[in-house]
Amino acid sequence: MHAESETAPAPMGRRERKKAATRQAIADAALRLFLERGYDEVSLREIADAADVSTTTLFKHFSGKEALVFDRQDEMRIHLLDAVRERPEGRTIPAALCEHALRYRLRGPHDEPGGAAFVALVNSTPALVAYQQAAWMDYTADLAAAIAEESGLDADDPACTALAHFALETPHAFRGHPDGAEAVRRAFELLENGWQGTAKA
């Protein structure tokens, strides 16, 4: 159940540190402007100017405007796969994915500085909502592979793909629900038990 520890990555060299710092400066400038003025009111040129880089440099680090908001996708992917691979003994995969959804998808980074404002920005911008969900769904194959590995099933087992797909789709399905957390829990009960364990008739 627990993944074997991996060798610690080698320290970044000066060039890599500089690239990482530039990327972070661009992302920070973009988020600051988006929060101050609104996502649709800020241009890429203004972001580049605020970060003191050219637009060419900006596009070397980010594929587009939406990606500037979600600059931690690699980190989110790691959290998602770790939810399956490093879950506590006795916790089922659906239960682990439900906990992950409630923590990282439904609430968002409220416990971080500026987290509530970030979540409000995303939720009030349809383009960002759509981009965020598409990014999560891109993890379906990776999540299915992790589920298969942890379950002793074939990598292409349809059940693993189905569980991965519905686990990633569920939080999005209940955006705006009066009790989103309870709705997500109910949905994961279905994934855990199947319809026969959920339906009364």
Image (cartoon, helix red, strand yellow):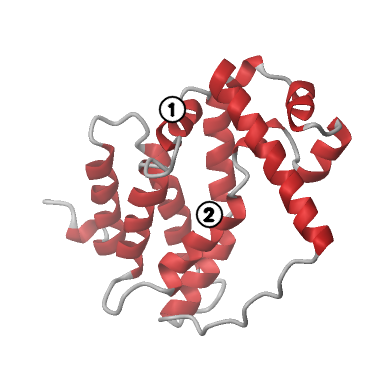
Q: Label 2: which residue?
A: 76
Q: Quadrant of the image for the N terminus? A: bottom left
Q: Residues within 10 Å of mark 1 (few under 14, many from 20)?
A: few
Q: Quadrant of residue 190?
A: bottom left
In the displayed structure image, the side of residue 46 where residue 82 appears, left or right: left
In the displayed structure image, the side of residue 171 where residue 195 appears, left or right: left
Question: Camera-side residue: 48 or 179?
Answer: 48
- For the point 28% across and 72% down, which residue is it? 91
Is residue 161 visible to the viewer in this orientation of the structure? no
Q: Residue furthest front?
A: 14
- For the point 72% across and 49% down, which residue is it? 21
For marks 1 and 2, give the CA distance: 19 Å
- For the point 67% across and 19% down, which residue is it? 42
Is residue 197 visible to the viewer in this orientation of the structure? yes
Q: Point out residue 188 in the picture as x, y percentages from the top left corner.
A: 29, 54
Which structural element holds mark 1?
helix
Q: Point out residue 198 in the picture as x, y percentages from the top left corner.
A: 18, 55
Q: Quadrant of residue 152?
A: bottom left
Question: Camera-side residue: 116 or 87?
Answer: 116
The circle on residue 101 is none
Q: Is residue 33 above or below residue 188?
A: above
Question: Camera-side residue: 11 or 142?
Answer: 11
Which structural element holds mark 2?
helix
In the displayed structure image, the side of residue 166 where residue 176 appears, left or right: left
Going by the numbered disc 1, the residue's amino acid type is: Ala
Among numbered discs 1 and 2, the one appearing first in the sequence:
2
Q: Is residue 40 above or below residue 67?
A: above
Going by the numbered disc 2, the residue's amino acid type is: Met
Q: Label 1: which residue?
A: 120
